[in-house]
Amino acid sequence: GGRRGTPNATPRDREGPRSVMPTESPAPFLSVVIPAYNEERRIAAAIRAVSGYLAGAGMRFEIIVVDDGSSDRTSEVVTAARADLSGLNLVRLDRNSGKGRAVQAGVLQARGEYIFFVDADQSTPIDQLSLLLSPLVEGRCDAAIASRALPGSRLLRRQTGPRRLLGKAFGHGFRALLVRGICDSQCGFKGFTRAAARTLFTQATSPTAIFDMEILLLAGRAGMTVAEIPVTWTHDPESRLTYNF
């Protein structure tokens, strides 16, 4: 199980994240981090979907929403939801710092034995989590990442032409320059053992949406095993380019 307490914020976030985290509750089996920037319209639905699925699966879990300096009511919506969900925690960054920094802040405060991050738009639905969790629990990998590019992947609504081309360009460049064998580095649905997550996200430096590439590069350099899993995925036309390539 995970250790209790709240790890220190990264040195790069000098203000530090402000968090509302449990202090005495037992460490959860699973932590799910949801980065959120101006997501007041979608975050409540994401929380309900994730908590409903995990509760139905009988897991001891926590959900950590990281408000990445939103200018809307994202934090207020999450705070209201906490009244009905004891496993919901909120981390607030003082300024918009980028998806990479938001995910890092959540992961480093997560207490679960297994730690996932998922997007607020639920483009990869939470019911795909079991596909990634199984190889982690069975000890077959240190990290499990969702893929939209493997045989067996189901894309219910594709990205627009420019985004698809941009994604392919990133994918080809990533495979050529960084980690060979990874078909889709950018899908916002990834899981790790606690040990792997702590190692990788402590070392991570990228604050932007390309942090996924850095995490996988660090995993390769550390000799970690990464399992790429085909999933069902639906493009959300409201997704932000700064958060999803």
Image (cartoon, grey):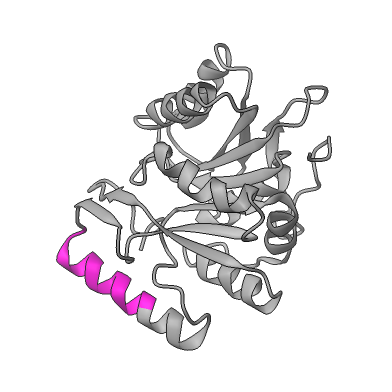
Residue 168's spot in the image, x, y percent? 30, 74
Classify 242 as above or below 60: below
Residue 96's spot in the image, x, y percent? 52, 50
Front residue of 228 and 115:
228
Classify 47 as above or below 106: above
Does 164 sit left or right of 133 as displayed? left
Does 40 sit left or right of 26 as displayed? left
> At x 63% / y 37%, what residue is drawn?
30
Front residue of 99 and 193:
193
Report which quarter residue 244 is drawn in.
Answer: bottom left
> At x 68% / y 35%, what residue is drawn?
29
Report which quarter residue 5 is drawn in.
Answer: top right
Image quarter (top left, top right, bottom left or bottom right) of the N terminus: top right
Is 167 in the magenta? yes
> At x 68% / y 55%, what residue is drawn?
197
Residue 26's spot in the image, x, y percent? 78, 25
Q: What is the magenta range?
A: 159-171
Residue 22's spot in the image, x, y percent? 75, 25
Front residue of 107 and 51:
51
User: Taking the image as drawn, is residue 151 in sight?
Assistant: yes
Q: How many marks?
A: 0
Classify 171 as above or below 73: below
Residue furthest out toward the top: 84
Image quarter (top left, top right, bottom left or bottom right) of the C terminus: bottom left
Is 143 in the magenta? no
User: Taking the image as drawn, is residue 106 in sight?
Assistant: no
Magenta portion: prevailing SS class: helix
